[in-house]
Image (cartoon, rainbow, N blue to C red):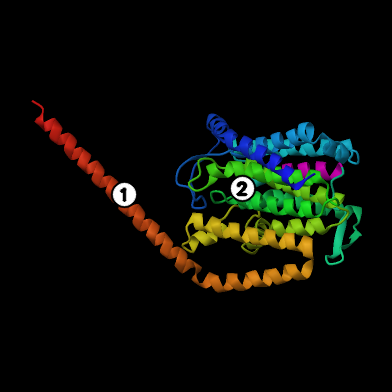
Amino acid sequence: MVEYEYIIPFAIALIVSFFTCPIAKKIAVRLNAIDVPKDDRRMHKKPTALMGGLAVIAGFLVSVFYEFLVYQPDELIKWLSDISPMKLIGFFVALIIIVAMGIIDDIHPLSAKVKFPVQLVAAAIVVFTGTKIKYFTISVKDIKYVSIDETISVILSIFWIVGITNAINLIDGLDGLAAGVTGIASLSLFVVAVMMAPDIHAVFAVLYVALAGAVMGFLPYNFNPAKIFIGSTGAYFLGFIMSVISIEGATKAYTALTMVVSLIALGLPIFDTAFAIIRRVINRKPIGQADRGHIHHRLVDMGISPKYSVTILYVVSGALGLVSILLANKGLLPAIILVVIISVFVVAGARYLSEIIGDKQNEEITERIHDDGEEKKKAHDQTRKYTHEQAEKP
């Protein structure tokens, strides 16, 4: 497939997702899937509709089905020729379970004791129908790998799917964060898939770019202040799709390098989730118990506004995506050098970041106070004018 042809699935997913968002909001309101800010973990100030993930799912599926059934059926036939029907059936059954669980969770919040077993079942269905991590990389430079034991393969695969599914959901704490980070990771892995062709089939490049397009179509409604949240419906869908595509992509590439690249591209949500688990274990709290210790909460608690916190995390995610691309294209050493260069500037700039952002926030607060003052003065003048006119009436 010619590179410019990937614009088509991206554009279709973006357009469908963008125009489906208002419909998703109507459905959420009708089903009372509303997130009410009732504790200090929530950053929004007013009730906001959930289930924005329905728009992302619609954009992704319409784009993928159009691409393979209408525009590029040959690519689909070529890919399906060496994949078992059970694997596809298992994937779609598990996807339906994950999406259904997300929808229910948005309408009637479920406890971790309910969601975790459901996720395990969905992951097990995918794994036992053939989608598994089969190789372990022992040398990125020479792309050397070894096959792993069947039992270890099953455990690792289930752990990966459930872990990434929850990682995307856990990072969904600020407007535009989960969707934006997933979109950046999807674009990074799309570039890797194109570069590694024909080892990685064109199908996976289409899946990544369609997912990125669907997320980009949703983001205008999700930027601060959000008009709709992606909700558990979208967060679990994004995490599940990313985890399964990365496993299957690695299988088709006959190398576990793709898994390493995926691990780096999704580094931000993975690190945040790992840190959350360690933190809760140390504090002797249930792993599934929500808290205010995530990366985005810490940035906000430092005095950085939610908008700037999201921007910072976008930049971090973009840097990790760049490292993953460089690792796939040039090998380990250039990727390490890039990490060192980025780290030097991050450490040097972080010392003054809060001061700069603090100044900017002070300007915004001043402008907001000034605007509020102008509005109050205007309202006062209108009241005086109204009273004066009323007084002049006989």
In magenta stretch: residue 87: no
Percent x, y of residue 204: 78, 46
Q: Is residue 241 visible?
A: no
Q: Residue at x 77, y 34 (%)?
A: 71
> Is residue 230 rendered to the left or right of residue 367?
right
Q: Amino acid at mark 1?
A: Asp
Residue 165 against residue 389 in the figure, above or below: below
User: Measuring 53% from the left and 40% from the top, which residue is drawn there?
Assistant: 228
Residue under circle 2?
A: 179
Picture disc at residue 372: 1
Secondary structure at badge 1 equals helix
The x and y percentages for residue 27 are: 57, 30
**Residue at image x 83%, y 37%?**
76
- Name which quarter of the figure residue 69 lies in: top right
Q: In which image quadrant can residue 258 be found?
A: bottom right
Q: Position of residue 193 (x, y in %)?
A: 78, 52
Mark 1 nearby-residue class (10 Å; few <14, some 14–19, many ≥20):
few
Q: What amino acid type should be assigned to the residue bearing mark 2? A: Ala
Q: Please tell me whether residue 122 belongs to the stretch shown in magenta.
A: yes
Residue neighbourhood size for the residue with mark 2, other residues' Cα within 10 Å, grouped as few (<14), some (14–19), many (≥20): many
For the residue pair 60 and 259, the one nearer the viewer reads as 60
Residue situated in front as seen by the camera: 107 or 210: 210
Residue 93: x %, y % from top left? 78, 35
SS class, disc 2? helix
- Magenta part of the protein: which range? 115-129
Name above or below for residue 319 compared with residue 68.
Answer: below
Q: Is residue 169 left or right of residue 352?
A: right
Instruction: Report the Cα–Cα distance between label 1 and label 2.
Output: 32 Å
Q: Most extreme residue toward the left, as rendered?
A: 394
